[in-house]
Image (cartoon, rainbow, N blue to C red):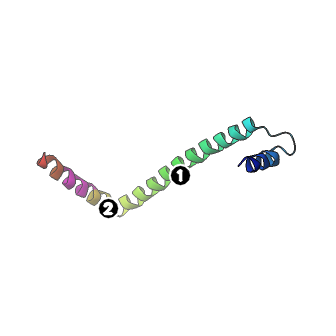
Amino acid sequence: MTEMTDQIYHRFSANGTIRRRDIIFNNLLGGIAWGLGSAIGATVILALIISILRQINLVPAIGGFIGGILDVANNTQ
């Protein structure tokens, strides 16, 4: 295990300019950017899908279906 760790560390620090702290910081920023991009992308795609469903009048049907489920859930309590 330590050989592999040493090889990885040697590979990243072969030119002497990349420190562990920099690697961790860059990976952290990359992860934050990936997560933010995924959230924005999912929002845009869902907005487009809802817009398309609204154009073909499926959203009221879906709303009626969910309303029926809520009525059943409220009546059973």
Residue pointed to by mark 2: 57
Residue at (73% x, 41% y) in the render: 23
Is 31 placed left or right of 73 in the picture?
A: right
Query: What separation in Å lies between label 2 and label 1 (alpha carbons)?
Result: 24 Å
What crowding class fits label 2: few (fewer than 14 Cα within 10 Å), some (14-19), or many (20 or more)?
A: few
- Considering the image in quadrants, where does the C terminus appear? top left
Start and end of the magenta stretch?
63-70
Question: What is the x, y in percent for residue 68?
Answer: 19, 55
Q: Do the residues under discs 2 and 1 have CB atoms within 8 angstroms?
A: no
Query: In the picture, residue 60 is in which quadrant?
Result: bottom left
In front here: 64 or 30? 30
How would you classify the magenta stretch by its main secondary structure?
helix
Asked if the magenta segment contains residue 19, the reply would be no
> What is the secondary structure assignment of the residue under circle 1?
helix
What crowding class fits label 1: few (fewer than 14 Cα within 10 Å), some (14-19), or many (20 or more)?
A: few
Residue pointed to by mark 1: 41
Q: Nearer the viewer, mark 2 or mark 1?
A: 1
Residue at (60% x, 42% y) in the render: 32
Is 39 placed left or right of 67 in the picture?
A: right
Tell me the amino acid under the disc marked 1. Answer: Gly
Q: In the displayed orientation, state which residue is furthest to the right.
A: 15
Looking at the image, tell me whether mark 2 or mark 1 is earlier in sequence order.
1
